[in-house]
Amino acid sequence: MKSGLQPDQLLRKFDSAVKNALVQSANQLDSQFTKEINSKKWDWPNETKRKNGKTVTAPRDIVDLGKLRSSQTRQQTGRYSIEWIWNVDYSAVVHNGARLKGGGTYKARPWTKTAEEEVKPLGYFADILRRELDG
């Protein structure tokens, strides 16, 4: 008789491995999102006096009073899915940019895209999953 994992044991092992890989990948992205917001790397066309009193030029971070950064939350939305939310009314404008009524533009600072480029979450997930399943 051949020994090894039975189908139900294999399913439990796989499910556990996927959940662990998902959590570890989410932790990496979570951290990188914050790092991107804090990074003095974002181009901006002019000098600005922020609400916190500091005057900034480019490159700059995207932190003024810290509300965008501190609004970052994540929640599991499905068995194998996680969603991040930045719950301030201007988060989409900061991330995606915008056209102003006077014809100008508000430059995009897509911190989620740059975080994903840095972490490469699918590859990170796959590496963890492979290690988990290989024992």
Image (cartoon, rainbow, N blue to C red):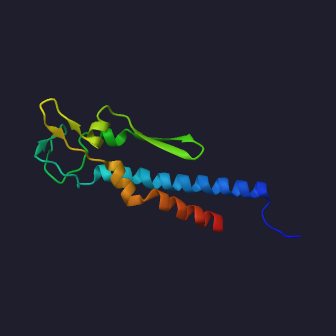
* Residue positioned 78% across, 63% down in the render: 5
Describe residue 132's horizontal placement relative to residue 23 as left or right: right
Q: Nearer the viewer, residue 129 or 61?
A: 129
Residue appearing at x 16%, y 29% in the figure: 101
In the rendered view, tell whether residue 48 sits above or below residue 131. above
Q: Tell me: 26 left or right of 35.
A: right
Q: Quadrant of residue 128?
A: bottom right
Q: Tell me residue 10's x, y (percent).
A: 73, 58
Rendered-image quadrant of the C terminus: bottom right
Quadrant containing the N terminus in the rendered view: bottom right
Percent across and percent down for residue 112 are 36, 49
Q: Name the outermost residue toward the top.
A: 101
| Label tally | 0
Outermost residue toward the right in this view: 1
Residue 119 placement (x, y as % from top left): 41, 59
101 w.r.t. 4: above or below: above
Residue closer to the observer: 36 or 50: 36
Point out residue 21 in the picture as x, y percentages from the top left corner.
56, 57
Of the pair 56 and 90, the residue shown nearer to us: 90
Q: Residue at x 12, y 43 (%)?
A: 48
Residue shown at 25%/46% (left/top)?
A: 62
Residue 135 showing in the rendered view: no
Q: Is residue 84 left or right of residue 77?
A: left
Residue 61 shows in the view: yes
